[in-house]
Amino acid sequence: MSTPFYVSPEQLMRDRADFARKGIARGRALVSLQYADGIVFASENPSAALHKVSEIYDRIAFAAVGRYNEFENLRIAGVRLADMRGYAYDRRDVTGRGLANAYAQTLGTIFSSGGEKPYEVELFVGEIGDSAEDDQLYRLTYDGQVVDEHGFAAIGGAAESVGGYLKERYTQGATLEDAIRLAVAALGHTDTDDREIAAKDLEVAVLDRNRTQPRKFRRIRPATLVEILSSVTTKPQVEEAKPAAVEAPAEKTVEKAGENAGDKSAEKPVADSPLAPPAEDDGEPPIAPPLD
Amino acid sequence: MSESRIPAAFMTPGTSSFADFLTAQSPELLPRHDGVPGNLSDIAPHGTTIVAATFPGGVIIAGDRRATQGNLIAERDMRKVFPSDEYSAVGIAGSAGIAVELVKLFQTELEHYEKIEGTTLSIEGKASRLSALVRGNLAMAMQGLVVVPLFVGFDPDAEKGRIYGYDPTGGRFEQTGYTGVGSGSLFAKGSLKKLYRPDLDEAGLVAVLIQALYDAADDDSATGGPDLSRRLFPLVHVITADGGRTLPDAEVAAVAENVIAGRLQRPDGPIAELEAK
């Protein structure tokens, strides 16, 4: 009889966390911002058919990064849970908090059970209320942690630098257009350079409390997106582009990349130059790539 | 939502039908009560008359507000016309309690499909899902709890309104121009036959449908006419390429008052032309 290997629980959990984090880091970032009339979700996603952001219920949306099949399962489960609850009770009895808890329990159980591979996903559950103060934004990690976010948050591969960019520039009560411009600029921001993401490669959706229908989720059409993004290059870009390129490196001291906790400050390494060519597209598929 | 891990069935890819999922997971939530013995037709209120007709660019569905139980009026302000999604609506006649549940299931069914699949069903697809739900109620229909819906919607491909009638076995039949369902529909259809013209505009068609409901209420004791003292008027839902909207009460009241004013002069309503024009 052979002696089984002993692996300490700490080591086991560390390994599982590393595994999940690596999978998530392969995908691009997704941001969520509160604006005056709701919550906007934006991500880079060249696929028009496979979504990272979706409607769950009247006032609840779901956004995720990581392995598509895994978060798609979670999304479907969310829609089923919400529809079942709304059907059995009442539409008002479906809450974002309840959904976030169900996801947290599920992700947590999968992460800590030995039998299953941890999910390589991170997600948002957003719910809008009657006013901005009542809006809720939950960020869930692969191990089932729930973080109640306020204002803005980023998940996915470059979440730290994207989150840092948002932290510097986010303002409360922005218009939808401003929020989308900021979100898209943040998505294009990396530690080494800023790139412009083509509108066709973006997926943007909002929970809009001004919508007259009970279902508040809507996708921003590509044409509308082009309009919103192009208006930045005509007017506000003059104010916007300069601080992004000049001010940030001048103001902030250089920090070792990856050392800070993501939202401490916007890291801008010295190597960053506004003249540097945009990073070559790494050929990322619409959603996260499969494991190798 | 549950306090522990989401059950595996919820996370299993497969059906995009909410009704099918419910059948597998929680059949007790379905509006079915198979196995109850006897004839149940007298224990629950019945909804009565729904009419629908198309006009260039859309479709309108309207229903009276009365529910009856035997010879009694059970409800005076019942809602029997419901938007099922942005581009479709359903009106119901028959056993009211079951019918309202069926509509709720149908609404969830359409919305569920839309969310899971990321696209809406075709108008035929929607009509066909409703067939399945009506058929599911067949056992109850045999015991007297019949539900017969009338489904209308805007077809974006053909750019016109469509109307589907049903029988209790789930058989669906597309209707041309106009139709009615429920106890007063015999009279409503007779009225529509004389007043309906395919080239009516939206306002004209609303007036014709209210005339038809008035005629149904005039001759069918189970159909309610406009209730002036309680200010209860028929529910009218209009669907065009821009989506659906239920007309505000004030708007319907104005038309209904106009119809009543005409009936004070001529109780049998407008006269149709004798000769074809």
Image: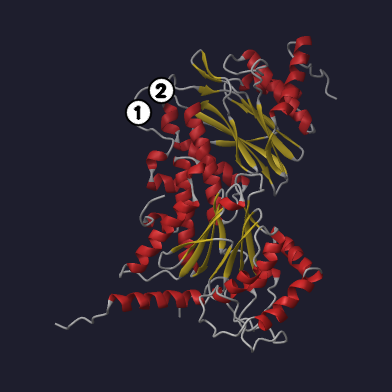
Q: How is the image coloured?
A: secondary structure
Q: Secondary structure at mark 2?
A: loop
Mark yes or no: residue B12 visible: no
Decide if residue B111 is on the left or right side of residue B27. Answer: right
Q: Residues within 10 Å of mark 2 (few under 14, many from 20)?
A: some
B111 relative to A159, above or below? above
Kindly identify which numbered label has been placed on residue B40: 2
Q: Position of residue B82 (x, y in %)?
A: 59, 35
Residue drawn at point x = 45 percent, y = 46 percent: A84
The residue positioned farthest toward the right in the image shown:
B277
Looking at the picture, do discs 1 and 2 lie on one chain?
yes
Residue drawn at point x = 63 percent, y = 57 percent: A206
Give the camera-side residue of B69 and A166.
A166
Q: Residues within 10 Å of mark 1 (few under 14, many from 20)?
A: few
Question: Which chain does tag 2 point to?
Answer: B
Residue drawn at point x = 36 percent, y = 78 percent: A15
Q: Position of residue A87 (x, y in %)?
A: 47, 42
Give the camera-side residue of A135 and B58.
A135
Are the residues at dot 1 and dot 2 in contact (C-beta closer than 8 Å)? yes
Q: Secondary structure at mark 1?
A: loop
Q: Position of residue A54 (x, y in %)?
A: 56, 58
Residue tagged by mark 1?
B36
Mark yes or no: residue A170 visible: yes
Question: Which chain does tag 1 point to?
Answer: B
Quarter where residue B215 is shown: top right
Q: Amino acid at mark 1?
A: Val
B251 relative to A246, above or below? above
